[in-house]
Amino acid sequence: MTEQANNGAAQSNEGPQFSLQRIYVKDLSFEAPKSPEIFRLEWAPSVALDLNTKQKQLEGDFHEVVLTLSVTVKTGEEIAFIAEVQQAGIFLIKGLDAASMSHTLGAFCPNILFPYAREALDSLVIRGSFPALMLSPVNFDALYAQELQRQQQGASQA
């Protein structure tokens, strides 16, 4: 009986593995170039969000994924603030084929990191005495699919 249990455990370790090792802030910045004058203007914000992901392989089966959120908020023509966070994670990933690995690093991991990045941005903005951003959820699977399609179109045109 023990032999069967041990064999089952050994077989389960041979399949794909995914494990979150660490989540951390890699970089954080906030700038309110027009304060305190901006606080006296009527608050009519327009928000521009730029997001980016990058990944690199660390030793062995460990990978770092960095999600960067950059937000520029204007009221009228004046920049109220610029905030940026680079939220990173270290993930142990093994046993995946190339396509699955690419999807995991490009969509699944950023999905895990996004709530942490959103909270870090909200905290920064509130500390700057502005209303919280409350960014909407992002569909990283759709963004990943769009990027794959763009790459395929670029390759076919080359």
Image: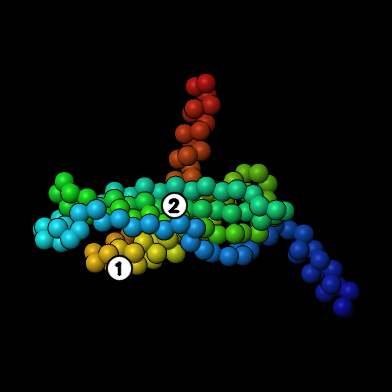
**Residue 67 in sight from this viewpoint:** yes
Task: Name the residue at 84% across, 72% down.
Answer: 6
Name the amino acid type tagged 2.
Answer: Thr
Q: Picture coordinates of residue 108 (x, y %)?
A: 53, 55
Q: Position of residue 65 (x, y in %)?
A: 55, 53
Residue at x 52%, y 47% (from the top left corner):
54
Q: For marks 2 and 1, give the one nearer the viewer.
A: 1
How does the figure colour the protein chain or chains?
rainbow
Answer few, some or many: residues within 10 Å of disc 2's Cα (few below 14, many 20 plus, some between 14 and 19). many
Q: Label 1 crowding class (10 Å Cα cut-off): few <14, some 14-19, many 20+?
A: few
Q: Residue furthest bottom?
A: 1
Residue 64's x, y, as percent? Answer: 59, 54
- Say which residue label 2 marks: 68
Rendered location of residue 101, percent (x, y): 62, 49
Q: Which mark is residue 127?
A: 1
Q: Residue furthest top?
A: 158
Report the side of 80 relative to 21 (left or right).
Answer: left
Does 26 appear above or below 146? below
